[in-house]
Image (cartoon, grey):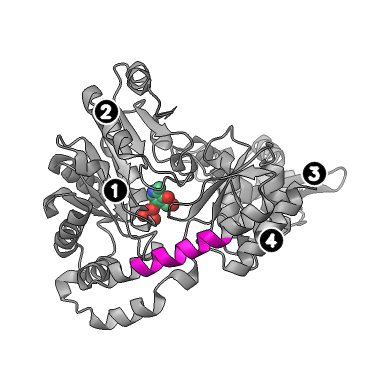
């Protein structure tokens, strides 16, 4: 034992000795159960008073690193390694709980976890089934994409100019007339919501949303300190918005075409009315239009196409049509807004994947995208019919629903409030995963969001009968 405390150090003798002993234990030089020299001997070896040694030993005993056995001496405690581990780790729970972003609901965490289990029948998943994804065609198209070195560097803040030019052309079919400068490429529409929440609103702003709403299942605004207000679009809409807004900043988030989770769409008059009211009250509208290409019949005009004053921030994505894994979406908005969101996006991730942007540009400009979406609409319609036939045959007495107009979902309402966490967990045990209505509206125990897009037909049938058997028991 050559070490001795430094009498010229700014640290006291007892702190230096305690650190030295802790280091010996943590390095394993003093092993669990090892007996320490007697106090008097330690004092001699370290050239300090015995009272300093007693103080150190008491402290390390209190920390659980040492233990005293009556009449036998002082030993390195059995639990010393656990104590050291706990002591040296930051209190992560406290960090996590005190942090800004809200956690997912426990039910959604479980959904995310069980979606990885291939034996699960996924009755609620908001994603295309592997058999509906154009995997082979995507793979083949990679051969046709030529890359220049510039294409795979960091892209411009607003995203690939080529893709934005192609998109401005593509959006004309939606009667949205815009320029590449008014488009920002994002890593999915969800990122657009996050950028809007931190880039355009002060804390405590009001975010109006439909009732129920997809927003309740992801929290981009809630986590940034916004106040969510659910709104019914009835004849008192203007008064309700005016009263709730007061003098605060606000925006209205809407999914007017194939709403998630209800699958419903606003009529043309309702779209115009919402735009007129929000324009009069200076409430910007975020129009989330990620499902519109999946309408089975004639498309309804986007609110953005009716917008003459730059009131609407428009969101699109290829996640529901081509591939969610590409992580490509877009925002159309007035230029100062796009510049602001692009600036934050650069600070967040330096732009979306260059490869994904090239792939989407190729699919949109070659016509492959439209051909694929036309096929997809037909396939989804067949799936919707298949599920509706089962519902009509066996669910009519216990539930109601509206025939699907497109997209992925049927908002199935049970007459009784069966849809609670217990049912959700019970179904998991039977390998069926549902999206209960309470993740879109915490008070709702009547609905499930039934998706006919993910599971195959056999699984859909089996899953629905397992669900039924749990409800009529
Ligand atoms: C209404 C709506 N908006 C946005 C998203 C997120 O889409 P993306 O994958 O483009 O981020 C989803 C996905 O479920 C959605 O349903």
Q: Which residue is located at x 15 percent, y 48 percent?
A: 182
Q: In the image, which is nearer the foreground, mark 2 or mark 1?
A: 2
Q: Which mark is residue 68?
A: 3
The CA distance from mark 3 to mark 4 is 54 Å
Residue 231: image x %, image y %? 42, 28
Residue occupying image coordinates x 62% and y 53% = 392
In the image, residue 229 sits, relative to residue 92, either above or below, namely above
Q: Which one is in front in this view, the residue at disc 3 or the one at disc 1?
A: 1
Task: Answer with mark 3 or mark 1, whichever residue precedes in sequence.
Answer: 3
**Label 4, residues with CA under 10 Å away: few <14, some 14-19, many ≥20:** some
Q: Check residue 315 in the rendering and tell me which mark sits there, or answer none.
A: 1
Residue that mark 2 sits on:
278
For the residue pair 15 and 360, the one nearer the viewer reads as 360
Q: Are marks 3 and 4 in contact (CB under 8 Å)?
A: no
What residue is at 46 percent from the left and 61 percent from the top? 381
Q: Which residues are magenta?
A: 374-386
Residue 400 visible somewhere in the drawing: yes
Left or right, residue 296 beside residue 165: right
User: Which quadrant would the N terminus be assigned to in this image?
Assistant: bottom right
Frontmost residue, 42 versus 283: 283
Residue 236, position in %: x, y? 38, 20
Asked if the magenta segment contains residue 353, the reply would be: no
Foreground label between 3 and 4 = 4
Is ligand 1 closer than 8 angstroms to the Cβ of mark 1? yes
Element under label 2? helix
Element class at badge 3: strand
* Location of mark 4 (residue): 431
Q: Is mark 4 within 8 Å of ligand 1?
A: no
């Amino acid at each position: 034992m050559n070490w001795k405390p430094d009498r010229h150090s700014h640290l006291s003798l007892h702190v230096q000795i305690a650190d030295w002993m802790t280091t010996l234990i943590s390095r394993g030089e003093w092993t669990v159960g090892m007996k320490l020299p007697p106090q008097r001997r330690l004092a001699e070896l370290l050239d300090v008073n015995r009272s300093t040694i007693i103080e150190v030993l008491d402290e390390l005993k209190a920390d659980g690193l040492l233990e005293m056995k009556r009449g036998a001496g002082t030993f390195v405690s059995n639990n010393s390694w656990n104590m050291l581990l706990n002591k040296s780790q930051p209190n992560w729970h406290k960090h996590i709980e005190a942090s800004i972003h809200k956690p997912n609901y426990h039910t959604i965490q479980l959904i995310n976890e069980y979606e990885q289990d291939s034996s699960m029948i996924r009755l609620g998943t908001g994603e295309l089934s592997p058999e509906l994804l154009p995997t082979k065609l995507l793979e083949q198209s990679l051969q046709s994409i030529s890359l220049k070195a510039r294409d795979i560097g960091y892209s411009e803040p607003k995203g690939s100019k080529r893709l934005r030019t192609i998109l401005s052309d593509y959006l004309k079919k939606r009667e949205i007339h815009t320029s590449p400068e008014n488009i920002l490429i994002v890593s999915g529409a969800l990122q657009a919501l996050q950028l809007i929440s931190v880039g355009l609103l002060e804390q405590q702003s009001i975010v109006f949303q439909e009732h129920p709403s997809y927003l309740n299942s992801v929290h981009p605004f809630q986590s940034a300190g916004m106040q969510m207000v659910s709104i019914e679009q009835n004849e008192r809409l203007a008064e309700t918005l005016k009263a709730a807004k007061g003098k605060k900043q606000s925006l209205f988030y809407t999914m007017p075409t194939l709403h998630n989770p209800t699958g419903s769409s606003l009529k043309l008059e309702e779209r115009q009315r919402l735009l007129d009211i929000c324009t009069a009250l200076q409430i910007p509208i975020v129009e989330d239009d990620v499902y519109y290409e999946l309408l089975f019949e004639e498309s309804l005009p986007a609110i953005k196409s009716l917008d003459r004053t730059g009131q609407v921030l428009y969101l699109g994505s290829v996640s529901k049509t081509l591939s969610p894994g590409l992580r490509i979406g877009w925002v159309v908005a007035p230029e100062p807004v796009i510049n602001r969101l692009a600036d934050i996006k650069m600070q967040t991730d330096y732009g979306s994947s260059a490869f994904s942007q090239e792939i989407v540009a190729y699919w949109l400009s070659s016509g492959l995208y439209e051909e694929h979406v036309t096929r997809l609409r037909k396939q989804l319609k067949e799936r919707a019919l298949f599920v509706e036939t089962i519902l009509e045959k066996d669910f009519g007495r216990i539930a109601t629903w509206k025939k699907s107009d497109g997209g992925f979902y049927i908002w199935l309402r049970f007459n009784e409030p069966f849809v609670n966490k217990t049912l959700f967990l019970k179904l998991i045990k039977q390998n069926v995963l549902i999206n209960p209505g309470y993740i879109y509206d915490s008070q709702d125990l009547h609905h499930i969001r039934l998706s006919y897009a993910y599971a195959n037909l056999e699984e859909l049938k089996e899953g629905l009968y397992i669900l039924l058997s749990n409800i009529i028991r």
